[in-house]
Amino acid sequence: LFPDMPSSAFHGSFTQLLVGAMGSPAAPPSPPSPFAVPPGLSPTALVGPFPPTGNFEMSHQQALAQVTAQAVHSQYTVGSQADYSLPFSSATTSALTSQFINSSANVTSMKETATLPLHTVNDNLKSNEVSQGFQTSALTVDKPADDGYNWRKYGQKAVKGGEYPRSYYKCTQASCPVKKKVEHSAYGQITQIIYRGQHNHQRPPKRRSKDGGNLLNEDDFPENRDTLTRSEPGSQDHSGKVEVSNDGITGSSISKRRDGGDQSSGSSDREEDNDEAGDDNGDAGIVNANKRWFM
DNA sequence: AGCCTTTGACCAGCG
DNA sequence: TCGCTGGTCAAAGGC
């Protein structure tokens, strides 16, 4: 079904991690596991294809409630990966979010989400790359994430042979250095979202989204700011990576960057410059980052 | 009118 | 040094 899905689209260790951590509901999350990010490594959130469970039809409210409750309960054990705000909107966001939390905190609750329809998995594909088939209506290609912030697309590029267009977004807030990359599969479905930088501002006032009017902001995810978007003290990363499959989230994990160093930035617009300013996302200061955002 | 997307070009890093 | 790849710029057009 996805013959051309290069495994390179996802990064080896990453993928393995993910699979190990959440590939199977039966598989208990290895304790020290992927979430234990050693200092200096950049925690990367990986939300990949879950064993399809998702009750994608669940209402936003339901999902939200679920997320909230779980966030509270779990106290978000995966704090280190928390630098990102959850990027998805509406029902998908909720499902995603809940799964994110579920998988992060405790895989056992994965069952709450429903079953995934489709093309779940091409077993030949490795880990994350599987399940691209979710026929999503919530996840649209160019507005993949209404996470409460406003984004402006500033570029798009076909990468990996042109089969996987990648879109580049900047936070529209003046002086906010946050950027994100969104990768799509050849089918226009989101396969990966990578955040970079820290928002140095609060979420903008509610704004009706173009596609469906879902509003999503701080009010919608009160806990997010405390649990999902904050880095742990020791965390040095602020670049989040959220992989999404059409199946919904399939899991999350933390991965290391290529050289074990930290990720990201390094380019001229150093968001690190202001992050320590105590923003909610406080990224602990990346000192010397690679220019590459990920492996 | 302002903001956003699209898209080709340009630039920089890396092998 | 050169080609490839990825990231960004900026003009044009749309909403």
Image (spheres, coloured by chain):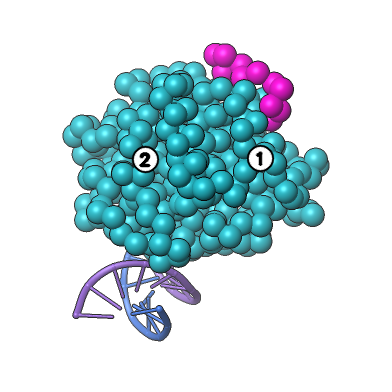
Chain colours: A cyan, B purple, C blue
Classify mark 1: helix, strand or loop: loop
Q: How many marks?
A: 2
From the image, tell me which residue sits under label 1: A114
> Is tag 1's residue or tag 2's residue first in the polypeptide sequence?
1
| Label number found at residue A221 | 2
A272 and C2: which is toward the camera: A272
A280 and A185: which is toward the camera: A280
Classify mark 2: helix, strand or loop: loop
Q: Chain of mark 2?
A: A
Residue A182 is situated, as x and y percent measured from the top left of the image, at: 50, 53
Q: Magenta segment: does it hold A167?
A: no
Q: Chain of mark 1?
A: A
- Identified at 72% across, 48% down, the residue is A117
- State whether residue A81 is above or below residue A181: above
Q: Is residue A158 left or right of residue A233?
A: right
User: CA–CA distance between discs 1 and 2?
Assistant: 22 Å
On the question of residue A103 being in view, the answer is yes
A271 and A192: which is toward the camera: A192
Amino acid tagged 1: Ala
On the question of residue A244 being in view, the answer is no
| Label number found at residue A93 | none
- Quadrant in which the N terminus of chain A is drawn: bottom right
Residue A71 is situated, as x and y percent measured from the top left of the image, at: 43, 28
Q: What segment is highlighted magenta in the picture?
A: A23-33
- State whether residue A9 is above or below residue A261: below
- Identified at 57% across, 18% down, the residue is A33
Q: Magenta segment: does it hold A26?
A: yes
Question: Where on the picture, by quarter, is residue A10?
Answer: top right
